[in-house]
Image (cartoon, rainbow, N blue to C red):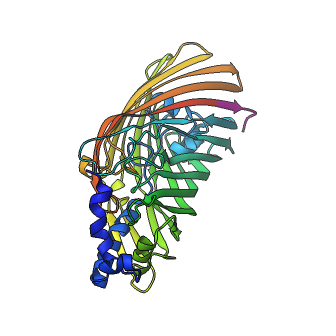
């Protein structure tokens, strides 16, 4: 069935116009127009930033450090280079020399949607495979035997999906970019031989650019377009605790504070026909300001690290992210008929576990590997095309080569595997029903990291 043909006689009834062609639609009340506008508001509410298939929501473990080669195992406890300022600020107190890390970590998103017979919108399958830039810069400098400071610039939070303009879910989203760049000055203090603490002030610069198609009401008229974009800067905190019961063993705890990115924009509609334009005007959506609040949730990770002997070290994590606080976003419409609509994504807190090992082959070569699991922040029935996430297994391998005493080069590869993900979403006649499966969903992360050390304290 062609969904476009079947739905037009219904929604067009809510439009009043003085032209002879539209007179038959003028019999319905103003309340009917509001009901139809509510369908469009639901679609606007669906235009909320999503994840790049990253379990645990939008957070990334691949930030341009060697952690990707361990599948994040030992995240808050390894503390052996300047990258620890992002994973556990307390670890800076362990460093004995100033060092500078440059890491490139591009991510390849392998995402393909296969619609089934229940989908009521005609169009192409969604196959938005794409590269997402990622990486980091980290500088650390010990001050004395107790104090150390550092600064880092990295991206641990991001999304980039482009389905194309003609896919079956285009009335929900056809393109979205959500990325956040963190700038973090950090201070660490060694309390005793066993205990260290650290804190970082994180300046988070977020960018949102999201687009969708809007169905026009006149038969045979091409789709209109909707665009929302904004930039925001917020402050949050990154705190760490490190305990070293022995020279070969340590435990670390990281706490990343919740913050909110309060995106705001006036949605821009283009290519809108006269009937839909009337619906938008009656709903107060023309020139309305939308508030799209995204919560960057609390995170807690506990890690352990132990050197078995001169050749082998083992490590692991358990973690928790409070994604249940992410799902509520208020869409505020200002105008004669102000409407407040809250869209609840029904997200759940996620749990994380990881194990890994390092093998020192010689003074020059060190190899690593790890495996991790993250639970899904959403059940199948609540999955949406702007955020097609699920549980994920992460597999990482890495190699480090010491070129000389002050320079090491590392390469990493991580596979984040989510497999097949079901989706069935229906937000009314404006968007239609989109049902099917994302097949063999995965992220591939390649890393190249340079670490320079120099001088002393």
Does the segment drawn in magenta span residue 452?
yes
Write down the region rendered in magenta: 450-457
Count of labels in the image:
0
> Residue placed at 53% from the left, 69% from the top?
265
Query: In this orientation, which residue lies closer to the viewer: 198 or 60?
Result: 60
Residue that extends furthest to the right in the rendered view of this protein: 455
Q: Position of residue 128 (x, y in %)?
A: 46, 41
Residue that extends furthest to the front in the rendered view of this protein: 20
Q: Position of residue 360 (x, y in %)?
A: 53, 17
Q: Is residue 193 left or right of residue 18?
A: right
> Residue placed at 43% from the left, 75% from the top?
280
Q: Is residue 400 above or below residue 424?
A: above
Residue that extends furthest to the bottom in the rendered view of this protein: 336
Query: In this orientation, which residue lies closer to the viewer: 258 or 49?
Result: 49
Does the segment drawn in magenta span residue 267?
no
- Asked whether residue 258 appears in the rendered view, the answer is no
Q: Is residue 373 above or below residue 334?
A: above
Q: Is residue 182 above or below residue 332?
A: above
Q: Is residue 442 above or below residue 408?
A: below
Q: Position of residue 350 (x, y in %)?
A: 32, 47
Q: Quadrant of the C terminus?
A: top right
Q: Is residue 209 left or right of residue 383?
A: right
Query: Picture quarter containing residue 33?
Result: bottom left
> Residue placed at 40% from the left, 48% from the top?
57
Q: Position of residue 86 (x, y in %)?
A: 55, 45
- Asked whether residue 141 appears in the rendered view, the answer is yes
Query: In this orientation, which residue lies closer to the viewer: 232 or 120?
Result: 120
């Amino acid at each position: 069935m062609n969904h476009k043909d079947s739905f037009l006689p219904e929604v067009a009834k809510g439009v009043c116009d003085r032209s002879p062609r539209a007179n038959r639609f003028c019999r319905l009340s103003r309340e009917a127009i509001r009901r139809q506008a509510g369908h469009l508001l639901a679609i606007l509410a669906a235009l909320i930033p999503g994840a790049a298939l990253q379990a645990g929501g939008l957070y990334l473990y691949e930030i341009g450090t060697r952690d990707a080669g361990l599948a994040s195992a030992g995240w808050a406890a390894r503390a052996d280079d300047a990258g620890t300022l992002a994973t556990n600020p307390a670890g800076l107190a362990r460093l004995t020399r100033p060092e500078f890390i440059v890491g490139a970590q591009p991510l390849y998103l392998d995402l393909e949607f296969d619609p089934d017979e229940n989908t009521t919108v005609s169009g192409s399958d969604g196959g938005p495979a794409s590269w997402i830039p990622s990486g980091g810069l980290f500088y650390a400098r010990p001050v004395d035997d107790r104090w150390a400071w550092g600064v880092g610039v990295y991206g641990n939070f991001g999304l980039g999906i482009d389905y194309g303009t003609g896919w079956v879910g285009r009335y929900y989203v056809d393109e979205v970019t959500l990325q956040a760049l963190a700038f973090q000055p950090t201070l660490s203090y060694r309390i005793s031989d066993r205990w260290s603490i650290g804190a970082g002030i994180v300046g988070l610069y977020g960018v949102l650019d999201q687009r969708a198609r809007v169905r026009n009401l006149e038969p045979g008229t091409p789709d209109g377009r909707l665009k929302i974009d904004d930039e925001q800067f917020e402050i949050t905190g990154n705190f760490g605790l490190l305990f070293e019961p022995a020279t070969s063993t340590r435990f670390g705890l990281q706490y990343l504070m919740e913050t909110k990115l309060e995106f705001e924009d006036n949605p821009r509609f283009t290519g809108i026909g006269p009937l839909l334009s009337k619906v938008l005007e009656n709903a107060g959506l023309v020139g309305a300001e939308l508030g799209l609040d995204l919560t960057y949730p609390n995170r807690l990770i506990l890690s352990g690290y132990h050197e078995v002997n001169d050749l082998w070290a083992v490590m692991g994590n358990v973690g928790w992210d409070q994604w249940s606080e992410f799902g509520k976003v208020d869409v505020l419409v200002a105008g004669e008929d102000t409407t407040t609509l809250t869209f609840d994504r029904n997200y759940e807190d996620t749990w994380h576990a990881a194990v890994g090992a390092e093998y020192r082959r010689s003074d020059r070569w060190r190899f690593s590997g790890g495996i991790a699991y993250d639970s899904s922040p959403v059940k199948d029935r609540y999955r949406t095309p702007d955020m097609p996430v699920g549980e994920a297994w992460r597999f990482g391998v890495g190699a480090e080569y010491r070129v000389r005493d002050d320079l090491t080069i590392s390469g990493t590869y991580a596979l984040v595997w989510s497999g097949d993900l079901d989706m069935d979403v229906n937000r009314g006649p404006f968007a239609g029903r989109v049902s099917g499966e994302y097949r063999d969903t995965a992220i591939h992360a390649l890393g190249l990291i340079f670490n320079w050390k120099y001088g002393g304290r």
